[in-house]
Every structure is written in C-alpha cells, then in structure tokens.
Amino acid sequence: MAQINSYLTFGGNCREAMTFYQSCLGGELYFQTIGESPMADKMPAKIKDLILHSTLTLGNLILMASDMTPQSGLTVGNAVSLMLDCTSEEEIKGYYEKLSAGGEATHPLEESFWGALFGDLTDKYGNHWILNYTRPEK
C-alpha cells in the first residue's frame, strides 16, 4: 500500500528546524547538502551549505524537509498540518510541550468528545501540528 509522508520546505533554516524536531520527537536524522549532491558543480557557491534533502525517521514516523524553495519563494500557510497520533498520555504531553516551545499553543491538550486527548499548536517555524491520543476502551 502507498504511504504519505510529510515534506517541509524551509528558507535556509532546514538544518535548525529538523534538529529541533529530532530533539522533540527523537529518531535518526539524515542531511544531504547541495554541496554534497551530484548537482553541486551546477549550483552557486552561496547555497552549497543549504539542505537539499533531510529525513527524520522514528519507526513509522517519517518527516522529510529541504531548503529548496520554488522560484516563487516560500509561503508558510495553514493549508497543511502535521498530525501526530500518539501512543500514550505521557507521549502526547511531552511532544506538545517540546513542539510548542517558542511557538504558539493554539489549542491546549484537552479531552475531546470522541474520547481522545487532543490539541494543536504552531511551532516556532510556522508549521501547524495536530496531536491526538485515543485512550484505550475500558
């Protein structure tokens, strides 16, 4: 079956943001700079330290990112959210606290009508996160 992964685009601070996400979520982090890629000789020297591709992997969680913005520029908006479906109350609380640091806790964690602990936030890089922990049925 196909799988959808989140792919974020940054305007020069991909390494910083992905390192932050690793500090919040854990996992293995990989970076490839433009200067390390086969296209390095075709690119201006001033962008060789920018991230061509980055992957943060923790089990089934895969978050990818790049500094490669389109020619039209980078527009951070609210059309895409990153959804974390957590496995415990401790996990969701820890992720919420770490990811909201320096950002905005737009919807603090609370019990939802569908029986889950739920909340959302905008992190310090302008990305919107939705966090959910569905409690086991008793």
Image (cartoon, rainbow, N blue to C red):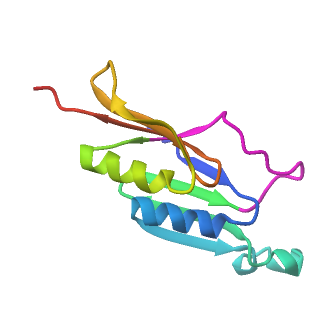
Which of 37 and 134 lies nearest the eye of the viewer?
A: 134
Q: Residue at x 66, y 64 (%)?
A: 14
- Percent position (x, y) of residue 98? 43, 56
The image quarter in which residue 86 lies? top left
Which of 119 and 12 lies nearest the eye of the viewer?
A: 119
Q: Residue at x 25, y 43 (%)?
A: 89
Looking at the image, residue 13 lies above or below residue 133: below
Which of 55 and 19 lies nearest the eye of the viewer?
A: 19
The image quarter in which residue 13 lies? bottom right
- Magenta stretch, main secondary structure, is loop
Looking at the image, residue 46 lies above or below residue 94: below
- As for residue 93 lying within the magenta part, the answer is no
**Span of residues in magenta:** 67-83
Tell me the quadrant of the picture where the C terminus can be found. Answer: top left
- Percent position (x, y) of residue 65? 62, 58
- Percent position (x, y) of residue 23? 44, 66
Tell me the quadrant of the picture where the N terminus can be found. Answer: top left
Q: Is residue 60 visible?
A: no
Looking at the image, residue 80 lies above or below residue 126: above
Left or right, 6 with respect to 61, comes to right
